[in-house]
Structures are given as C-alpha cells and as structure tokens.
Image (cartoon, helix red, strand yellow):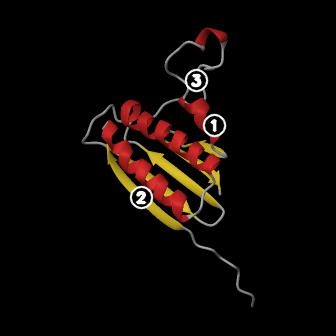
Amino acid sequence: MEQADVRTGQLYTLQLPSKYESITQLEALIEEIADKYQVSEDTFANMMTCLNEAAINAIVHGNKLDESKTVIVNADVDAKRIIWTITDEGPGFDYNHLPDPTAPDRLEELTGRGVFILKHLADQCIFNAKGNEVELHFKI
C-alpha cells in the first residue's frame, strides 16, 4: 500500500488583550514567520496590512477595547501557504451587507474600508457565519 506524501504545517497562536498595544505582538509574529518561510516582500506587505486591519477591527469593533476579552490569532503555515485566523469575542457583524467604500459618496469617509482591503489583498478571505472570525489565506 502506498503512503501519501503528507506535509504537516506548523501552527502559531497568539492570545491578545483587546488594546491597541497588542498589535506589536502580532507584527513580531508576522515578521518571524515571514523570515522563517522566506515570504516575498509583496506578500509580507499584504499580510501585515490585512492582519493589522483584521486585528484592530477585532479589538475595537468586536471586543470594544474590553481588555478582559481576547483576540485569538492563529497562523497555520506550510511550505506553500499561510492561513491566518483572527477571532474576537464580539457578537459579529453582517459582512455581506457593507456599504461599498469605492462608491462616490463614500470616498471621503474615514472608515469602512477594512473588509474591502482584506478581500483585495489576501488570496482568500472567509468569514464565519457569525462574523466574529476571519480566515485569510496567503500563498508563499
């Protein structure tokens, strides 16, 4: 019987308190993984932008800056891809009915571009049904 060539990835996990300063821990992890797996500069920049956006949204909108609540960040890494998962303890949101940030009447708005950014910079962006978890895929 032939054995399948199964490559197992490595899992990284952070539990971040819901405060702005927690982002530095996430950035350090992104840099560590990018260095270890020789991630291209473009992919690194896209990951840094998306993960900062997703984590800040989880901290501010999901957990309402309540430091007793955590944001869980997982990175599942193998030789070809990184799957990041960001989960907050909030009630979630309806990611299917967001205003279009590129609409002429929204161009000067200061907020409301986060999900748009995630969907355009990640290779794949998947929200759970509740809307309090996002999975971001990046090919490396």
Taking the image as shown, residue 20 lies to the left or right of residue 3, namely left
Q: Nearer the viewer, residue 117 or 135?
A: 117
Amino acid on which the number 1 mark rests in the picture: Lys
Q: Is residue 23 depicted above or below 82 in this figure?
A: above
Looking at the picture, how far across and down is residue 3, in whole percent? 70, 85
Q: Which residue is mark 1?
A: 119
Q: Residue furthest right?
A: 2
In whole angstroms, how far apart are the C-alphas of marks 1 and 2?
A: 23 Å
The local secondary structure at tag 2 comes to strand
Q: Nearer the viewer, residue 6 or 12?
A: 12
Disc 2 crowd rating (10 Å Cα; few below 14, some 14-19, many 20+) is some
Q: Is residue 104 depicted above or below 60 in this figure?
A: above
Amino acid on which the number 3 mark rests in the picture: Leu
Q: Which mark is residue 13?
A: 2
The local secondary structure at tag 1 comes to helix
- Front of the two marks 3 and 1: 1
Q: Which residue is mark 3?
A: 98
Q: Residue furthest left?
A: 68
Residue drawn at x 56%, y 68% is 9
